[in-house]
Amino acid sequence: MNYKNAAEILPADLLEELQRYSEGMLIYIPKASERKAWGLDSGIRKELDSRNSAILFDYNSGMSLSDMAQKYYMSESAVKKVIYRKAR
């Protein structure tokens, strides 16, 4: 993150108004656009949700944890986390 001198980028009247509230303080001004959730742009969130649903289906079908761990290239503890999170 880059810091800019407000006097260099803001109009004088806006700068004076800001100084009334926060003179000498560092303030953060967030972007106007809302931030998208993790993985939405790349599509990885959709892939992980699909994989996790398949893991839950396999679990409900009686597949063992070790078989699921091998099938999805995960540790058994990671498979358990997916199952317990999705089962809630």
Image (cartoon, rainbow, N blue to C red):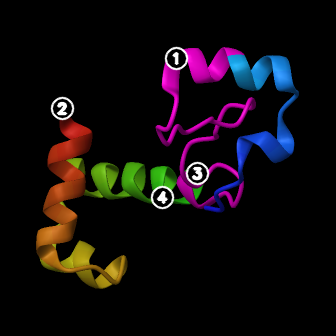
Q: Looking at numbered disc 2 in the image, what kind of residue is underneath it?
A: Arg
| Horizontal and vertical percent position of residue 23 | 52, 29
Q: Which residue is mark 3?
A: 46
Query: Label 2 vs label 4: CA separation?
Result: 17 Å
Q: Earlier in the sequence, mark 2 or mark 4?
A: 4
Foreground disc of the pair 1, 2:
1
Task: Check disc 3 and report its element: helix, strand or loop.
Answer: helix
Q: Earlier in the sequence, mark 1 or mark 4?
A: 1
Placement of the N terminus among the 4 image quadrants: bottom right
* Residue 48 disc label: 4
For residue 74, side relative to residue 72 (left or right)? left
Query: Label 1 vs label 2: CA separation?
Result: 46 Å
* Residue 21 disc label: 1
Task: Check disc 4 and report its element: helix, strand or loop.
Answer: helix
What secondary structure prevails in the magenta region? Answer: loop
Q: Residue at x 67, y 57 (%)?
A: 43
Q: Residues within 10 Å of mark 1 (few under 14, many from 20)?
A: few
For residue 86, side relative to residue 45 (left or right)? left
Q: Residues within 10 Å of mark 3 (few under 14, many from 20)?
A: few
Of the pair 70 and 2, the residue shown nearer to us: 2
Query: Label 1 vs label 3: CA separation?
Result: 43 Å
Query: Label 3 vs label 4: CA separation?
Result: 6 Å
Query: Label 1 vs label 4: CA separation?
Result: 45 Å
Q: Are circles 3 and 4 on residues that touch, CB within 8 Å?
A: yes
